[in-house]
Image (cartoon, helix red, strand yellow):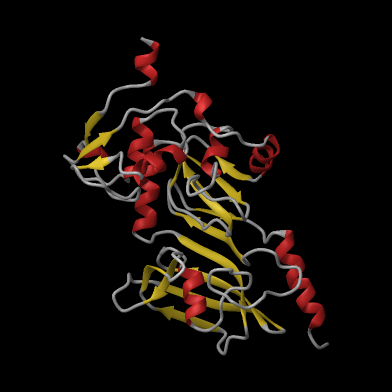
Amino acid sequence: MGEATQRPAVRHATVSADQAGQRLDNFLIGSLEGVPRSLVYRLVRTGQVRVNGRRAKPMKKLQTGDQVRIPPVDTRRSGQPSIPLGLIEDIRARILYQDDDLLVVDKPSGIALHGGSGLKFGLIDVLERIREGLKPVHRLDRPTSGVVVFAASRQASVALQEAFTTRAVDKRYLALLSGNLSQAQMPIDAPLKKIRDGSGQHRVIVAEDGQEARTVFRVLEALPGYSYVEAVIETGRTHQIRAHAAHIGHPIAGDERYNPQSGPDRLDRLFLHAHYLHLPWPEERVFDAPLPEALGSVLDHLRQMSPS
């Protein structure tokens, strides 16, 4: 009996009306209790999960009546990745807020939201050691630091995903752009498209047949060879700020994918930090993550180079 519990047969689940609109990855996590999110993504990526008999992406929005093939999965806790205790404690100290509905954390640079693609674990795997049942409702790139929100209840997951989808969330980032912007405030309204370049690496470029994307760069401080800005995004496309910054000829400092130039001294990461997030649910709330000390020291170094 124990073996049957750990290794169930293939299941075919029907999406109910109250599950409609839920993302495939979140649907699977709810169906595969105890399975690491990284494994869920691996199952989808390798085609073991099917929606109406076809492959699907983790972000696919499910509809009422959809048939989801769920493969047999070993749900034993021993299958979870090994995570350093020091990292778990570091992430615990970075929790900005939590209650019965959500958890907000200041994500460090260098850790992806999910495992997979050569990564043994992601931020969600670390948080599962602290609190089970969390689901991310938006995402940050691996090299980007800052505020990330996780839903801790079904109600929160639905409400927060709706808020992000309808652009009811105010998201602001701090970034260091190469060169000096010609305007104090520069709106960029340029559609973005995902491609794979000659080296096989995924990139995002401005293209007429891309998805709508709008970013506003506001200069906070002009520095020698750089502009310290706040970026407000009205849409949430992959690599949006990075791609828009590169498009206008002012790529983000430390961006190995979109910026061929070397960054300023003391910078060893992407200078992009999600510092402000305003949520409308369950009530109006603002979460703020201060600029990391490592990025602040880069600004101080550039300021010292400025003419008095």
Depth order, front residue of 224/115: 115
Position of residue 28 relative to residue 279, above or below, is above
Residue at 36%, 46% (x, y): give it. 45
Depth order, front residue of 17/295: 295
Q: Position of residue 159 (x, y in %)?
A: 36, 46
Position of residue 48 relative to residue 165, above or below, is above
The reply, left or right, for residue 251 in relation to residue 213 is: right
Q: Taking the image as drawn, is residue 306 in sight?
A: yes
Quadrant location of the C terminus in the rendered image: bottom right
Quadrant location of the N terminus in the rendered image: top left
Q: Position of residue 248 (x, y in %)?
A: 49, 83
Residue at 32%, 69% (x, y): give it. 211
Furthest-top residue in view? 1
Q: Position of residue 109 (x, y in %)?
A: 62, 56
Q: Taking the image as drawn, is residue 158 in sight?
A: no
Residue at 43%, 25% (x, y): give it. 75
Furthest-front residue in view? 199
The reply, left or right, for residue 84 in relation to residue 205 is: right
Q: Which quadrant of the view contains residue 29?
A: top left
Residue at 33%, 38% (x, y): give it. 27
Q: Which quadrant of the view contains residue 209?
A: bottom left
Position of residue 185 relative to residue 82, above or below, is below
